[in-house]
């Protein structure tokens, strides 16, 4: 079975008028008109970058042989004239010059995709910003796949998946780089205005993710207490201050003081036991963070109950369905649904699944939908609301391993695939074999 690409347009049939030879072309709707403009913006953005790079080369050609000092002055002059002529800031002009240099001279495939409106200008900016941070000797392994990702994914998903791709390519040096980076952890205060300021904590992202999750969960509980008037952000800030200054949660409501940090880490099981298996396999991944060093993953999977461990094992005993027996998914099934998706299954949404609601694609009460893996997906509150009240039709595609198809009120279809697939096992050659997408080798929550 084939499905439309993520942004497949609605098909508007052309027709012939009766008794006349005149052909009546398809009539674009309002969305088609917007997309037509977006296409032109991408085409013109690519042409602008080509002309900016041509301008830079033309100016630099005039000072060949005059030394690095002359080049610095010339580039500053080019940036100044570009900003003055375009009536933008010098910073913005400098960004355009860097983007033009990168796309014309290093990532021509991305520039061609932009010029043919297969990607947007924002995709191109993200591609340059992220790939320019990669060691030059590793870029060749990434560029073509990065362009393919940009053509297939919306901006938010593309940024996340390109970061993951880069991290996988750099896995071999991840341990060394992490050890060096973690040595630079620190805390600082940055003064603001009106008696306010910023507390800056530079620390491992796993810990920061856990801190943010715990603080948010506590704030949500406090927000529901009678007489509470603060916003969620105000409560979050107050909770952090109270915890750091007083070091206790005894003054908080009981339901909030008992909340602990929670992080989901996915690790191929053999990697926990064998260094060679760890080097050959995929890197461990933390939800909302991305790949982490194997040594850090082993630490997180060491048995502390506050970490939800996700391991590869053929005998998981996963609960896949309870049919119509109950509406609420059992805890194991709820974890599995969120682990498989990793994110909200709304088009382009980056909300971590741990912060999403589990939705029955076919309504349990109205359409006799079952409480099963094939009928459940995590949706953030916003996309959950749109799904039920915005005129969209949302269905999980049979046999897709969790892909969800959204059909808009205008008839356009958008397919969102989960980050992972649940491993399935078939009997072949007298033993068990793992079937399905390679990503399924990561396993599932237990």
Image (cartoon, rainbow, N blue to C red):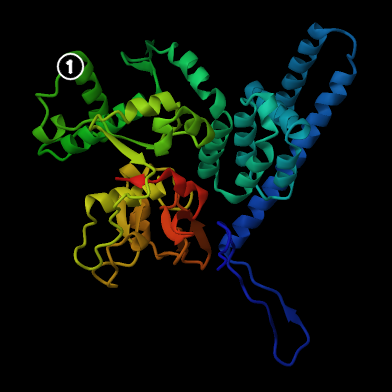
Q: Which of 380 and 334 is in front in this view?
A: 334
At 9% from the left and 24% from the top, the residue drawn is 251
Front-most of 281 and 107? 281
Instruction: Look at 40% across and 21% down and name the residue there.
Output: 204
Q: Quadrant of residue 22?
A: bottom right
Structural crowding at the residue carrying mark 1, measured as other residues with C-alpha within 10 Å and reported as few (<14), some (14–19) or many (≥20): few
**Image quarter of residue 252:** top left
Residue named by callout 1: 247
Q: Position of residue 440 (x, y in %)?
A: 45, 49
Above or below, 346 against 233 in this view is below
Question: Seen in the image, is 239 located left or right of residue 67?
Answer: left
In this picture, residue 419 sits left or right of residue 316:
right
Q: Determine if residue 408 is in view.
A: yes
Residue 267 seen anywhere in this rendered image of the structure: no
Q: In which quarter of the image is the N terminus?
A: bottom right
The extreme front residue here reads 430
Query: Quick one: 443 or 21, which is closer to the camera?
Result: 443
Task: Please provide percent x and percent y for residue 116.
Answer: 73, 50
Q: Residue at x 46, y 27 (%)?
A: 275
Dot 1 lies on which element? loop
Q: In which quarter of the image is the C terminus?
A: top left
Taking 356 as reference, is 322 above or below it? below
Q: Would you say 192 lies left or right of 368 here?
A: right
Q: Which residue lies furthest to the bottom in this view?
A: 19
């Amino acid at each position: 079975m084939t499905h439309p690409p993520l942004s497949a347009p609605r098909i508007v049939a052309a027709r012939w008028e009766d008794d006349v030879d005149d052909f009546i072309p398809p009539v674009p709707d309002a969305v088609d008109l917007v997309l037509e403009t977006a296409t032109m913006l991408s085409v013109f953005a690519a042409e602008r970058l080509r002309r900016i790079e041509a301008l830079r080369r033309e100016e630099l050609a005039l000072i060949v042989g005059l030394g690095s000092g002359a080049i610095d002055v010339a580039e500053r002059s080019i940036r100044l004239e570009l900003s003055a002529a375009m009536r933008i800031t010098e910073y913005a002009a400098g960004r355009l010059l860097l983007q033009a240099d990168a796309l014309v001279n290093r990532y021509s495939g991305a520039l061609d995709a932009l010029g043919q409106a297969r990607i947007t200008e924002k995709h191109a900016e993200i591609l340059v910003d992220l790939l320019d941070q990669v060691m030059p000797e590793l870029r060749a392994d990434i560029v073509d796949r990065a362009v393919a990702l940009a053509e297939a994914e919306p901006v938010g998903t593309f940024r996340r998946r390109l970061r993951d791709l880069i991290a996988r390519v750099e896995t071999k040096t991840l341990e060394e780089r992490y050890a060096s980076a973690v040595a630079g952890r620190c805390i600082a205060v940055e003064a603001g205005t009106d008696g306010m300021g910023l507390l800056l904590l530079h620390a491992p992202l796993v810990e920061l993710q856990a801190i943010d999750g715990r603080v948010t969960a506590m704030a949500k509980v406090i927000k529901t207490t009678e007489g509470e008037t603060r916003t969620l952000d105000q409560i979050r800030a107050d909770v952090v201050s109270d915890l750091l200054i007083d070091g206790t949660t005894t003054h908080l409501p009981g339901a909030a003081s008992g909340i602990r940090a929670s992080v989901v880490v996915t690790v191929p099981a053999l990697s926990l036991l064998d260094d060679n298996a760890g080097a050959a396999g995929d890197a461990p991944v933390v939800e909302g963070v991305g790949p982490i060093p194997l040594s850090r993953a082993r630490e997180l999977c060491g048995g502390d109950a506050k970490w939800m461990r996700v391991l590869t094992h053929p005998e998981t005993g996963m609960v896949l369905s309870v049919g119509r027996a109950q509406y609420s998914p059992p805890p194991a099934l709820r974890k599995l649904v969120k682990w498989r998706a990793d994110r909200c299954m709304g088009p382009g949404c980056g909300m971590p699944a741990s912060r999403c609601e589990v939705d029955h694609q076919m309504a349990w009460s109205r359409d006799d939908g079952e409480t099963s893996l094939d009928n459940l997906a995590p949706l953030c509150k916003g996309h959950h609301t749109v799904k039920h009240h915005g005129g969209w039709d949302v269905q999980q595609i049979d046999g897709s391993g969790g892909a969800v198809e959204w059909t808009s009120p205008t008839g356009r279809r958008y397919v969102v695939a989960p980050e992972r697939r649940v491993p399935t096992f078939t009997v072949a050659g007298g033993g068990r074999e793992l079937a399905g997408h390679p990503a399924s080798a990561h396993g599932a929550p237990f």
